[in-house]
Image (spheres, rainbow, N blue to C red):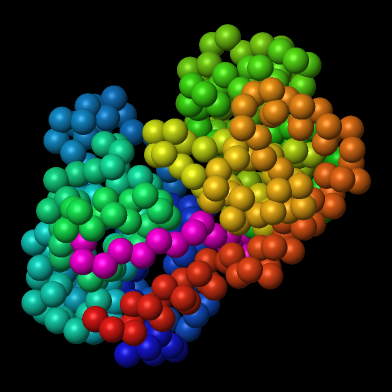
Amino acid sequence: MRPGPALRVLFVGPLLKGSTTLQRLDSFRGLGCKVQTVNTRKNTSFVKPSLFERIERKLLGPRDRAEANETILAAVQQGSFDMVWIEKGLTISPATLGKVRAVQPACRIIGFSLDDVMNPGNQSRHFFRGLPLYDWYITNKSYNVPELKGLGCRRVVFMDNAYDPATHRPMPVSVEERKRLGGSVGFIGQWEPDRAGSLRALARAGVPVRVWGYTWERMRDAPGGLTLENRPLWGEDYAKALCAFDINLCFLRKCNRDLQTTRSIEIPACGAFMLAERTHEHLRLFEERKEAEFFSDERELLEKTRYYLEHNEDRLKIAQGGHDRCLRSGYSYQERLQKVLALIFERK
């Protein structure tokens, strides 16, 4: 069976407003799939977990508070599907996967995660025990491919990060929007020690930096010139902020061993200038000095930040090159997922 307009998909995942999960869901619909959804979260907006919930998760693992397992089983009993697509299925039990297989033996069971599965924060007993029951597992971490196979996955596919054209696109920015969201240099993402150190170094060198994202209250010694908004941006505000910064910094998560991240594609897709950590995967995705810029240490980060703040024409030319590369090389979710589906349905 090949993917096409008749492909029937049960899409399972955290359906949070502004999330990349919703962007992939929309991409499946854009490919002509008939999609039914199961939300693995009780809410559709992010709610910071309470202290009790954090302690409970650490002791007992993630809980299926949304009753997603029951909803999945009801769906496969009532309808017929070609594929069950499960995003970060930490709360989906092996028993549920086994029952899906028993009820609909021809249905492909596909796992997907944007997180490093070897990071303890991205694991659960259900997850590990269920891995051998997936027909395919899709990861954006190249190093997870052999690791997932070693954990019992039958087939593993590496998929580079992607962007959503409906969200990540060049947008005009008014003076008021630049004041509300942007500035000279910006970073959007969570606090991590190495990121804090690099941002502190830039600010102390006189470079004004604005930061959006969670948990930046942990940085208690922010120097002058470093503005910490300490709240996330979603959807259009996120994309608008990328367009409202002259330079967008792209740090990688060391706890996830990242070689690329969602921002690696989303920033250039917005036609915005990206200054990212240099990795072999970044260099494969974008040509240095023509489609993006990269740094390997704080010295190079500071040098290139200063240079591109002073050379507007060079910066704009590289930003345009990055945007063109996203279009030319098919970096959108729909294009990437189309290739994955063709592979999945080529054989079982």
Is 186 or 167 nearer to us in this picture? Answer: 186
- Position above or below: 300 against 172: above
- The residues colored magenta run 153-167
Corner quadrant of residue 148: bottom left
Question: What residue appears at the point 21 percent right and 61 percent down from the top-left corner?
Answer: 153
Query: Where does the N terminus fall, quadrant-wise?
Result: bottom left
- Relative horizontal placement of residue 201, taking residue 232 as reference (left or right): right
Q: Where is residue 207 in the image (x, y as percent from the top left)?
A: 77, 22
Would residue 66 be seen by someone viewing this image from the given angle?
A: no
Q: Is the magenta stretch mostly helix, strand or loop?
A: loop
| Residue 271 pos. (x, y %) | 75, 55
Identify the residue at horizontal 66%, vertical 17% (top origin). 201
**In the image: residue 267, left or right of residue 281:** right
The image quarter in which residue 241 lies: top right
Residue drawn at 28 percent across, 84 percent down? 347
Quadrant containing the C terminus is bottom left
Q: Is residue 250 above or below residue 230?
A: below
The residue at the point 62 percent across, 27 percent down is 297
Total numbered labels placed on residues in the image: 0
Which of the pair 9/191 is nearer the observer?
191
Q: In this rendered view, identify the residue nearer to me: 84 or 177.
A: 84
